């Protein structure tokens, strides 16, 4: 078997989708946490000036904080297409307002609020305003790995896929062992820690929350050090047709929003790859972060 990871990227369609910088919304003035405390704090939406990919997901005086720019379209059907077709790693261009012509990169998709999250350099954030329109060159849905038909790829730009240092293992030994895809991640998450997003009918948009209501477990698993943009593996979980528990299955995803004090919530994970029968084998790599892979920020600039 050819050890090169081959895909159908030459057949992937690149199409325009568009949203606009969304305003923060609040249905109530406070949220009650799992600890019974009512908090008033920033949450989803808007332009977040001081939180970017590469920063820690913990400790912010906020809830479900989306780094950089949150965007959506006011028309529900248009926004469904925007959230489904935009993929992590896609190029985004501001097409109205003072920042017109500036480029950014899609770093995640947040379910419930149905936002596409985009990273822009700090100098561009200062020029953006609520309502500015952003066009995304959407490409990635439909991406397939030629020699691994049982691995489903979703929400993943082909260029980012090729930068993830995915390797084929097993087959080279020539002893009948099943070939696997070795995928770099910063941490592994057991399915028991997964909360909001379980049971969703699709994983081609939105996210799946790592619950953070048991801090000692997070420390034990190294999940207390998660950053926006980190690639993680979720064990015994499948995103093939929605999200569900499944022994032996694996989800590879990217951390897209901050932790939360709300029961059943925490850092969100947008699915990039999933397999049900052991075709994916995660391997630990502390540099597995989209900010590093895409050159958005050097790792040396990540805050401690």
Image (tube, helix red, strand yellow):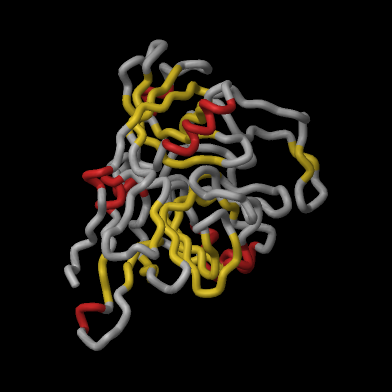
Is residue 121 at least partly visible in the picture? no
Residue name at image x 46 percent, y 47 percent: 228
**Quarter in which the N terminus is drawn:** bottom left
Q: Position of residue 85 (x, y in %)?
A: 43, 37
- Compared across the picture, whether 220 is left or right of 184 comes to right
Picture quadrant where residue 246 is located? bottom right
Judging depth in this view, the residue of 57 and 238 nearest the camera is 238
Judging depth in this view, the residue of 238 and 258 nearest the camera is 238
Is residue 27 at least partly visible in the picture? yes
- Compared across the picture, whether 97 is left or right of 76 comes to left
Picture quadrant where residue 165 is located? bottom left
Residue name at image x 46 percent, y 33 percent: 68
Residue name at image x 41 percent, y 49 percent: 154
Q: Is residue 98 above or below residue 3?
A: above
Picture quadrant where residue 157 is located? top left
- Compared across the picture, whether 171 is left or right of 30 comes to left
Q: Position of residue 183 (x, y in %)?
A: 34, 64
Q: Is residue 45 above or below residue 287?
A: above
Residue name at image x 65 percent, y 47 percent: 260
Which residue lies most toward the right here?
A: 36
Counting labels gives: 0
Q: Position of residue 241 (x, y in %)?
A: 53, 55
Which residue lies most toward the bottom here?
A: 175
Q: Is residue 210 above or below residue 235?
A: above
Judging depth in this view, the residue of 149 and 100 nearest the camera is 149
């Amino acid at each position: 078997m050819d050890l090169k990871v081959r895909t159908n990227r030459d057949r992937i369609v690149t199409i325009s989708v568009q949203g606009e910088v969304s305003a923060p919304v609040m249905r109530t003035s406070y949220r009650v946490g799992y600890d019974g405390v009512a908090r008033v704090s920033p949450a989803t939406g808007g332009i977040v000036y001081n939180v970017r990919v590469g920063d820690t997901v913990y400790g912010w005086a906020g809830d479900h904080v989306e780094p950089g720019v949150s965007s959506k379209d006011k028309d529900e059907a248009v926004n469904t297409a925007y959230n489904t077709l935009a993929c992590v790693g896609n190029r985004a261009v501001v097409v109205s307002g003072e920042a017109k012509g500036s480029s950014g990169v899609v770093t995640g998709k947040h379910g419930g609020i149905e936002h596409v999250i985009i990273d822009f350099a700090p100098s561009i954030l200062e020029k953006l305003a609520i309502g500015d329109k952003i066009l995304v060159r959407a490409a990635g849905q439909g991406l397939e790995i030629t020699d691994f038909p049982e691995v489903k790829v979703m929400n993943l730009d082909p260029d980012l896929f090729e930068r993830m240092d995915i390797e084929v293992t097993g087959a080279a030994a020539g002893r009948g062992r099943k070939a696997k895809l070795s995928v770099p991640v910063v941490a592994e998450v057991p399915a028991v820690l997964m909360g909001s997003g379980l049971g969703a009918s699709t994983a081609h948009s939105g996210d799946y929350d790592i619950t953070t209501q048991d801090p000692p477990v997070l420390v034990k698993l190294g999940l207390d050090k998660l950053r926006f943009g980190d690639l993680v593996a979720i064990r015994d979980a499948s995103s093939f047709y929605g999200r569900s528990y499944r022994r032996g299955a694996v989800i590879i995803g990217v951390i897209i929003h901050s932790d939360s004090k709300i029961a059943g919530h925490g850092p969100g994970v947008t699915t990039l790859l999933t397999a049900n029968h052991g075709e994916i084998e995660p391997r630990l790599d502390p540099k597995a972060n989209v900010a590093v892979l895409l050159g958005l920020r050097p790792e040396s600039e990540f805050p401690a």
